[in-house]
Image: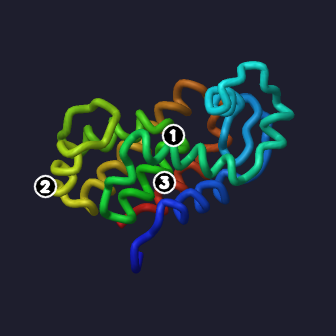
Amino acid sequence: MTGRLTDTQIVEDIINREGGYVDHRGGPANFGITLARLRDWRGVQSLTANDVRMMRRGEAALIYDHDYIRRPGFHLIADDRLRHHVIDFGAHSGPATAARKLQQVVGADQDGVIGPQTLNAIRRTGAANANNLLMAERIKLLGRLVSGDHSQAAFISEWLNRALEFMV
């Protein structure tokens, strides 16, 4: 990647990957934002699937920026590819899971928030190495997900392709 990839560009990429409104076994989601996430974001538990359907792209971008980038500290990761990968992983599996898996592969305390200790561990490990180690953990996690719930097998090819896009 050339030049600094902005968090706004990463969010746009994730929204494009997630697509529009769906309502399947996981419940209603739009731009990858679930009904539960939207209820938490707005602080209104009475929201319905229609509220998810009517959510604007800009609101989804705000949710991603706040909950999937700033809150877990992913914006502090200097390497564009690794930052993009961790944010994408967080959008798919939850930011705490992505943070803990990153911390695991770089040998940092697994508290789910990126801070100075994790950033130093990334520097020691090397961003490219950390990225590829994280990809391996992400793929193993996907395998465990499908093994535990065979109905998820329909999505595995797409999920694996998505993870492998971040290979260095």
Q: Amino acid at mark 3?
A: Ala
Per the image, the residue denoted by label 1 is 67
Mark 3 Cα-neighbour bin, 10 Å: few <14, some 14–19, many ≥20: some
Name the residue nearer the viewer: 99 or 37: 37
1 or 2: mark nearer the eye: 1
Check the image and tell me how it is coloured: rainbow
Residue 167 vertical placement versus 45 (above, below)? below
User: Are there few (<14), some (14-19), or many (20+) residues within 10 Å of tag 2?
Assistant: few
Name, please, the residue furthest toward the front: 43
Where, by quadrant of the figure, is residue 99 drawn? top left
Residue 107 located left or right of residue 142? left
Marked residue nearer the N-terminal end (2 or 3): 2
Q: Amino acid at mark 1?
A: Asp
Residue 39 rendering spot, x and y as whole percentages: 68, 27
Q: CA distance from mark 1 to mark 2?
A: 27 Å
- What numbered label is drawn on residue 124? 2
Q: Could you say where residue 80 lies in the image, as x and y percent from the top left? A: 38, 65
Residue 26, compared with residue 108, is above or below; it is above
| Image quarter of residue 103 | top left
Residue 44 in the image, given as x and y percentages of width and height: 71, 23
Q: Which residue is found at the position 22% from the left and 50% from the top?
A: 119
Residue receiving disc 3:
163
Q: Distance between the Cα atoms at labels 3 and 1? A: 21 Å
Look at discs 3 and 1 and give the one toward the viewer: 1
Tell me, for residue 6, which label it has, or none.
none
Residue at screen point 79% across, 41% down: 22
SS at mark 2 in the image: helix
- What residue sits 52% from the left and 31% below the top? 145
